Amino acid sequence: MRVSIIIPAYNAERTLAECLTACMQQTHRDCEIIVVDDGSTDRTAEVAQSTIDNRQSAIRLLRQSNKGPAAARNLGAAHSTGDILAFTDSDCVPRPDWIERLLDGFTQGVVGVGGTYAIANPDSLLARMLHEEIAVRHELSRDDADFLGSFNVAYLRSAFESAGGFDESFSKASAEDNDLSYRLIDAGGRLRFRRDAVVAHYHPTRLWPYLRTQARHGYWRMKLYRKHLRRARTGDQYAGTLDLSAPPLALTLCIALPAQALWGWPLSIAALVAALAYAFVRVPLASHMYRRTRDPKMYLFAAVALLRDTARALGMLAGIGRFFLWPITR
């Protein structure tokens, strides 16, 4: 079965060559590789072209103005020939059996199969913490999934095209994969999660850029929930109801702690309640991460999560104004 591996790339000069090399080394041999340069301002296109020239392999390079990864993936799909459309990101390094394991998941009624992460940069503490959080969540995930991440996923072309592909109005890298997963399920398809389909990922290593990204995620998550209101109450198996409560709790805590000096005990009680509720949501996750690694530094994740959830909450507030209130008032 022919598989089209589609890689959206934006300013990916540092990691793209490694990603392409791994894609060319798949044990499933009938693969084509399509790189879509999403208006990069660095040497992304040159790196892709150099790999093509040096390896003389079945890699194609497409280019577009910067429209976001959803549009880039759709462009790659439109120029592909495979019966299966596989997607990974330019900062991921698939294992040699990645495609083979994804294909094993396509049983009757399954329209999409996704996999998990390994870590490509374990020297960074922040990267290790973020990786372990994902590892815990994937460890608890069911085989029958209700969300598949676009960093490691394959779809039947027929189902992908029937759904209309990725929604290009998600113009940044956030929530477009949730949206497609929800639409495929609502159309009657099944999604499958495979723990043995693995791509290594270069996780963030710097806190401030990571927090900016998380604020963006909060913003676009509001567009997602405006489109899928039912999921705003329940989330999905990767991020459920408790996870949805974490950003507003974090923001309440960050506001109430300094405000109690001005308004006294009512704010102290609010801060205490928010702190206890937030600890109930995040400390068990940090504990699970510690049990997996036996690294006491994993408990620092609770502090990182507080900053992250606060950033997400600020993005969510902006998203509520943009996607819920502005359409009503304009």
Image (cartoon, rainbow, N blue to C red):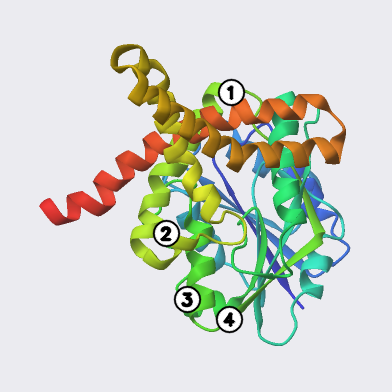
- The reply to whether discs 4 and 3 touch (Cβ–Cβ < 8 Å) is no
Camera-near label (4 vs 3) is: 4
Looking at the image, tell me whether mark 4 or mark 2 is earlier in sequence order.
4
Q: Quadrant of the N terminus?
A: bottom right
Q: In this view, does 66 lie above or below 229?
A: above
Disc number lying in front (1 or 3): 1
Q: Which mark is first along the chain, 3 or 2? A: 3
Dot 4: few (<14), some (14–19), or many (≥20) neighbours within 10 Å?
some
Direction top: furthest residue: 261
Q: Tell me the kind of residue under disc 4.
A: Gly
Distance from Cα at disc 4 to Cα at disc 1:
38 Å
Of residues 93 and 247, the one drawn nearer to the viewer in this rendering:
247
The numbered mark at residue 189 is 4
- Amino acid type, mark 2: Ala
Please report whichever mark, 4 or 1, sits nearer to the chain's N-terminal start.
Answer: 4
The answer to whether mark 4 and mark 2 are in CB contact below 8 A is no
Which residue bears the numbered disc 3? 163
> CA gap, disc 2 to disc 3?
21 Å
Report x, y in % for residue 33: 69, 58
User: CA–CA distance between discs 4 and 3?
Assistant: 10 Å
Q: Which of marks 4 and 3 is nearer the N terminus?
A: 3
Q: Which of marks 2 and 1 is in front?
A: 2
Q: Nearer the viewer, residue 188 or 68?
A: 188
Q: Position of residue 94 (x, y in %)?
A: 78, 51
Give the alpha-carbon distance from disc 1 to disc 3, as whole Å: 36 Å
For residue 288, above or below residue 142: above
Secondary element type, mark 4: loop
* Label 2 sits on residue: 232
